[in-house]
Image: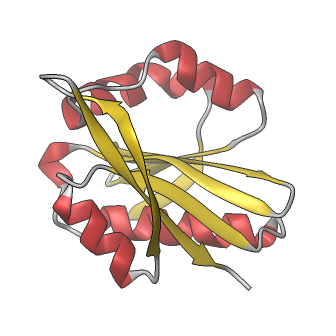
């Protein structure tokens, strides 16, 4: 299987939104993706055998980076694509001189949390009622990794 990672473009948004809506119970809106693209965030697509299988977005400013979104199409999960995307975003943050990376993850997203721990992220805090949920809201675990 051939695997490629390339910069996301505005014309990619229909496929990105399809994947996002399949991958998350509370997906990002088209407007959020457009804002990320127009404000210079690192927005990337993962393509396997000609099909968009995932995307990732990281912001970098003032020596820090923030992993904003990683999504892998449900049919392609469990095959290492998420790890490849996060590793790519870590490289991009380092190339832009970020000394650290932060992210939020739902405590209920055990698979993602385990991946981040395997990649060297550590829990540094908690944001109460951060994520929308089917009933009420869910906290976010704040994770961080030093990049230098």
Would residue 89 be found to the left or right of residue 137 on screen?
Answer: right
**117, above or below 61, in the image:** below
- Is 143 or 80 nearer to us in this picture? 143
Would residue 71 be found to the left or right of residue 98 on screen?
Answer: left
Residue 99 visible (yes or no): yes
**25, above or below 84, in the image:** above
- Residue 2: x and y, percent? 36, 65
Q: Quadrant of the N terminus?
A: bottom left
The structure residue drawn at horizontal position 36% and vertical position 78%, both measured from the top left corner, is 117
The structure residue drawn at horizontal position 62% and vertical position 53%, both measured from the top left corner, is 66
Q: Quadrant of residue 115?
A: bottom left
The structure residue drawn at horizontal position 62% and vertical position 31%, both measured from the top left corner, is 9
**58, above or below 111, in the image:** above
Q: How many marks?
A: 0
Q: Quadrant of residue 92?
A: bottom right
Q: Identify the image's colour scheme: rainbow, by chain, secondary structure or one colour.
A: secondary structure
The structure residue drawn at horizontal position 68% and vertical position 71%, both measured from the top left corner, is 100
- Residue 85: x and y, percent? 45, 62
Would residue 96 be found to the left or right of residue 50 on screen?
Answer: right
- Residue 22: x and y, percent? 20, 30
Residue, far front:
128
Residue 50 visible (yes or no): no
- Residue 69: x and y, percent? 46, 44
Q: Quadrant of residue 55?
A: top left
- Is 21 or 141 nearer to us in this picture? 141
């Amino acid at each position: 299987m051939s695997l490629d990672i390339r910069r996301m473009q505005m014309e990619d948004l229909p496929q990105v939104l399809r994947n996002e809506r399949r991958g998350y119970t509370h997906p990002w809106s088209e407007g959020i993706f457009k804002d990320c693209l127009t404000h210079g965030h690192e927005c990337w697509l993962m393509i396997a055998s000609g099909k968009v299988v995932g995307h990732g977005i990281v912001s970098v400013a003032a020596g820090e980076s923030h992993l904003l979104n990683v999504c892998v199409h449900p049919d392609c999960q469990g095959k290492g694509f998420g790890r490849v995307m996060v590793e790519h975003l870590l490289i991009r943050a380092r190339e832009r001189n970020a000394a650290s990376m932060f992210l939020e993850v739902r405590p209920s997203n055990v698979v993602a949390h385990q991946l981040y721990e395997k990649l060297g992220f550590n829990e540094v805090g908690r944001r109460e009622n951060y994520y929308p949920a089917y009933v009420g809201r869910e906290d976010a675990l704040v994770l961080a990794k030093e990049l230098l």
